[in-house]
Amino acid sequence: MSLFKKLRHILQPVLKRIIPALLKLTVLQLVVLFLTMAILVSLIMVLTIDFLWDGRFNTELEVTAVIVTFLDGLLIVGLLAALLSELREEVKQSKRVEEEVEFKNTVLQTQQETSLDAILIVDGNAQITSYNQKFIDLWRLSPQMLSARLDAPVLQSVVDQVENPEAFVAQVQWLYEHRNNKSREDIQLKDGRIIDRYSAPITGPHGKYYGRIWYFRDITELKKAEAELCIAATAFESQEGMLVTDANNVILRVNNAFTVITGYTANEVTGQNPHILNSGSHDANFYAAMWESIVVVN
């Protein structure tokens, strides 16, 4: 390695730190610094020329040069100390910013991975920027496919699982074209699963568009439960009188047929024991016939 390359190798990292610090100095500070250095260099040159000319130093010139050099040195040291102080503060500030960014990224990553939803985030060009493990599991994708960060093969793999792929793709394209819109719908898959899909734009505080986030959740069991509840509600409101009690025989609910048969309103019997129906005003045959027309669900 040549001498020039060695010097460049040594000075390059130093200059990278000093030059930004110099740019932060005021005009007056820069003028003082460069004038001080110019005076110092000039005195050194004068002393050198004087020595080479006469073979000795001029005493008066030498004393003056020493004093001026000392004062210049003080100024330079002061300015360099100020520069070093600013550099240290800049390094500290940079470290604080890095730690803050790392903390925020860690929090976001933790929220994403512990979410109940499968999450996919794409940028303004519809390229994948982030996703969680639940997204891989829900859509049964290979990690290698997602690691490429390409949206097209992932979208195709998802579309292949959807019962109505044309409508699915059309909605995705519509959302990419209408960046400010949100969307939520149920997606029926070929394997019988039902997926709740929600999508919203990612925008900055000033409205700048950064991409789109997609949430997916398997709601198959929820839909089954809703269907069963609907069936149960339909059966409950049949022509047969029905009442529902808890384990302590406290009435929780009755249907319309019950109020017609007994004459009691729902508010009158809720919280009561079924024995409220045995008022004693009728004979045993009446109550036997009434209970035969009422179904008790405990």
Image (tube, grey):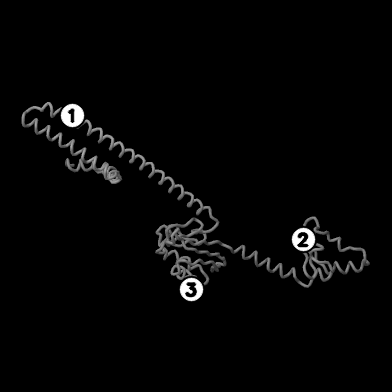
The image position of residue 49, as x and y in percent, is 9, 34
Q: Which residue is mark 3?
A: 166
Discs 1/3, front: 1
Mark 1 or 3, nearer chain start: 1
Compared to residue 111, the image places residue 178 above or below, namely below
Which of label 2 and label 3 is nearer to you? 2
Of labels 2 and 1, the one closer to you: 1
- What's under tag 2, amino acid-wise? Leu
Q: Position of residue 181 (x, y in %)?
A: 49, 67
What residue is pinned by disc 2? 252
First in sequence, mark 2 or 1: give its number.
1
Q: CA distance from mark 1 to mark 3?
A: 88 Å
Mark 2 → mark 3, Cα distance in angstroms: 48 Å
Q: Which mark is residue 296?
A: none
Residue topped by disc 1: 66
27 sits to left or right of 293: left
Residue at figure coordinates x 53%, y 71% from the top left: 163
| Sooner in the amino-acid sequence: mark 2 or mark 3 | 3
- Relative depth, front residue between 97 and 232: 97
Q: Residue at x 76, y 71 (%)?
A: 238
Q: Is residue 296 left or right of residue 69?
A: right
User: Residue 21, how many percent across, how many down?
Assistant: 30, 43
**Quadrant placement of the C terminus:** bottom right
Q: Residues within 10 Å of mark 3 (few under 14, many from 20)?
A: few
Q: In this orientation, does residue 270 appear?
A: yes
Q: Residues within 10 Å of mark 2 (few under 14, many from 20)?
A: some
Nearer to us in this view, 144 or 67: 67
